[in-house]
Image (tube, grey):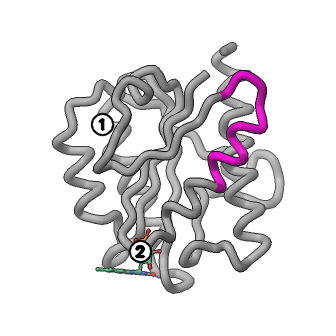
Amino acid sequence: MKVSILYHSVSGNTITVSELIKEGAVQHENVEAKCMSIEDLDLDFLNESKIVFFGTPTYSGSLTWQMSKFIETSKINWKNKVCSVFATEKHLGGGADFAELSVIAHMLVKGMFVYSVGASEGLPYTHFGAVCIQNGSEDEKQVERAILYGNRVVKNVIAEFKL
Ligand SMILES: Cc1cc2nc3c(=O)[nH]c(=O)nc-3n(C[C@H](O)[C@H](O)[C@H](O)COP(=O)(O)O)c2cc1C
C-alpha cells in the first residue's frame, strides 16, 4: 500500500516531521511511503496512494497560503482517499490546531475520509493530527508522537479498509 506524505516547508521543520511520520508508516509490512513537497510531486505515486498526509507550517494561526493554493488549484482526484494532517508552529498555542482543521475542512470538501486516531488509543493523543513546535526533533515526546502518528494512522486504515 502506498502512503503519500505531502508538505509545504520553507525552513525545513515540516520536512523533518514528515520524515518522522514516514518512519512510523513504514513500520508496517507492505507499506511504501514517500515524502513529497507540494512543489515537486510524484503524481503517479500520489494517485496510487490510499492515505495522504498533509503537513503545513502555521502562518498567522492557520495553514499557509501556499498549501491553501495547492489544494484549491491542483487537479488531483482526492475522492475516497484517507486524509490525515500534521502541522508545525513556532510557539505553543500558535495556531497549529486551527491550521490542521483548515486543511481538514478543505479535504472534506474534496471528498476525502479524514482520520487522526485522536484520543482513541491512549497517550500520546493526536487530537486533529500531529503537532510539532518547530521541527520537534530536539524533544523526545514530539518525535515519539510524530512517529506513532504515522504508525497508528496506517495501522488502522489497513485494518478498517481491509487493505
Ligand atoms: C509568515 C509566517 C507566519 C508565521 N505565523 C506563525 C503563527 O501564527 N504561529 C506560530 O506558532 N508560528 C508561526 N510561524 C512559524 C512557523 O509556523 C514555524 O517556524 C514552522 O515550523 C515553519 O515551518 P517550515 O520550517 O517547514 O517552513 C510563522 C512563520 C512565518 C514565516
Q: Position of residue 107 (x, y in %)?
A: 36, 40
Q: Looking at this view, is 101 or 79 the one in front?
A: 79
Residue at 34%, 29% in the rendered image: 43
77 versus 42 height, above or below: above
Q: Quadrant of residue 79?
A: top left
Say what secondary structure mark 1 lies in: helix
**Which of the two residues, 103 or 29, is positioned nearer the viewer here?**
29
Q: Position of residue 36 (x, y in %)?
A: 43, 46
Q: Earlier in the sequence, mark 2 or mark 1?
A: 2
Left or right placement of residue 127 versus residue 30 in this view: left
Quarter assignment of residue 152? top right
In this view, the mark in front (2 or 1):
2
Q: Specify the label residue 11 is tagged with.
A: 2
- The quadrant the N terminus occupies is top right
- Mark 2 nearby-residue class (10 Å; few <14, some 14–19, many ≥20): few
Q: Residue at x 34, y 63 (%)?
A: 63
Q: Which residues are magenta?
A: 20-31
